[in-house]
Amino acid sequence: MAAPEPWHGSPVPGRCAYFVERKKRFCKMIPAPGRRFCGEHGQQEVYFVQDINAGLKDVAEIPEETVPISSLSKEELKNLIIKVKKASNGLELHLKEQILSHQALQEALNDPKNGESAFKHLKQQASILGNMEKLHLLGPGRCFVEFGAGRGKLSHWVDVALQNVENVQFLLVERATTRFKVDGKHKRRDSVFERLQVDIQHLCLNKVPILETKKLPVVGIGKHLCGAATDLALRCLVESYTACCDGENEEPAPKRSRTDKKEVASNNSADNESNKEDCKPVAGIVIALCCHHKCDWTHYVGREFFKSVGLGPVEFHYFTRMSSWATCGMLEATTKAPTSEESEDQTNDTGGHEQTFIKTEGDSDTLQGILTVEERKEIGCLCKLLIDHGRIEYLQQRGYKAALQYYTESAVSLENVLLTAVPSPSVIPAPTT
């Protein structure tokens, strides 16, 4: 496929010639000798659509640079805490425990060779599969799309669970180059696995050839999908992909004479509604959430919820920072803070995002005399809950029955909340009698 042409003037000499529309500038990466484009922009696949899932396009809404929490006055910090508590008033503060398992992982879970880290990952994967089974998402005629796939272990276990099921496909989405992939371990010859090396922000599922051909209902899955990547994945599924599928199903009506129009008008209306209901391109979503401190207002899907409770981009920014209080206060922050690339690169399963602790801004003198460690943890949990509730409302408004639940113990993972969504019963056709 031909490389994209540069837009708007000329790039900096020696830099990539791809114009990044969202940033209104050319890419700053250095291409290989003799090439005009960097590795990411040199050969774009057909499913690459620039910023299709990015979200906010109104630059005026994006907040200006904000000062760190440690630079806020005690009064400003108290006002933020008041806003958190007020906005969370009325929300379900105690999530249901849905800690399940699945037979597909029993042999692996009982393997005495497992180290502690491997055992914890297996418990989480088993519970995710158990929750998928409870929602009737493990079955034939599905395309499972794993976002932030890394080595592809979650898809691997789904494949093991479906060893006697036909017509199943897997798409593993990962923007980073991945080592030690488990794709080659799949035992079923008829399993179809395809890797898409692309940022979720630019992924147009409707243009993926395997989905264009068979059009199977999609199940979106992810284990510890980091920060804004969750919002990009949700928009990819329920906006970009669903909208494309709905558009494809709207076929032009055949030409009829005037006498025919009145007779078929009511029938056509009923048929169109039935067709819309029958088209359910996304059968379900199951994502283990992670790294709320890396969420971004630009990509966040719950902006309307925040606005409805009197909050905006500035509060959102501080709440994402304060969300780390929920976990970072529980262990001493001795680990080096990861870079954005390191945190979102899930190419190894040795520790997981939940095992990495950053030194929070809440450790400064600003909090002394305002919050105890337990109070800080409580505020951090409220911030995470607010962010996640915005995602739930986003899904509910688009016809999904969505929920949050604890899918594993905090001793296994401090990031132990699972987001699930299936089409609401109201949009599923009632059985004919």
Image: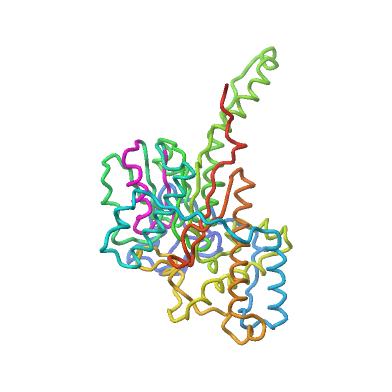
Picture residue at 42% right of the left edge, 44% below the top: 208
From the viewer's perspective, tell me whether residue 85 is left or right of residue 323: right
Foreground residue among 45 and 139? 139
In magenta, the rendered stretch is: 142-166
Furthest residue toward top:
259
Tell me if residue 144 is in the magenta stretch: yes
Tell me which residue sits at (59%, 76%) in the image: 374
Q: Is residue 129 above or below residue 384?
A: above
- The percent coordinates of residue 356 (x first, y second) are 44, 72
312 vs 157, left or right, is right
Residue 318 location, quadrant: bottom right
Q: Quadrant of the C terminus?
A: top right
Spot occupied by residue 5 in the image (x, y as percentages of width and height) = 45, 55
Q: Please determine whether, in this image, residue 355 is positioned above or below residue 407.
A: below
Drawn side of residue 2 relative to residue 240, left or right: left
Is residue 153 depicted above or below 189 in this figure?
Answer: below
* Residue 355, quarter of picture: bottom left
Find residue 2 and report its horizontal and vertical position in percent. 39, 50
Which residue corresponds to the image point at 34% horizontal and 36% vertical from the top-left?
166
From the viewer's perspective, is residue 215 above or below residue 363?
Answer: above
Q: What is the basis of the colouring in this image? A: rainbow
Q: Is residue 251 magenta?
A: no
Image spot of residue 316 (x, y percent) = 64, 67
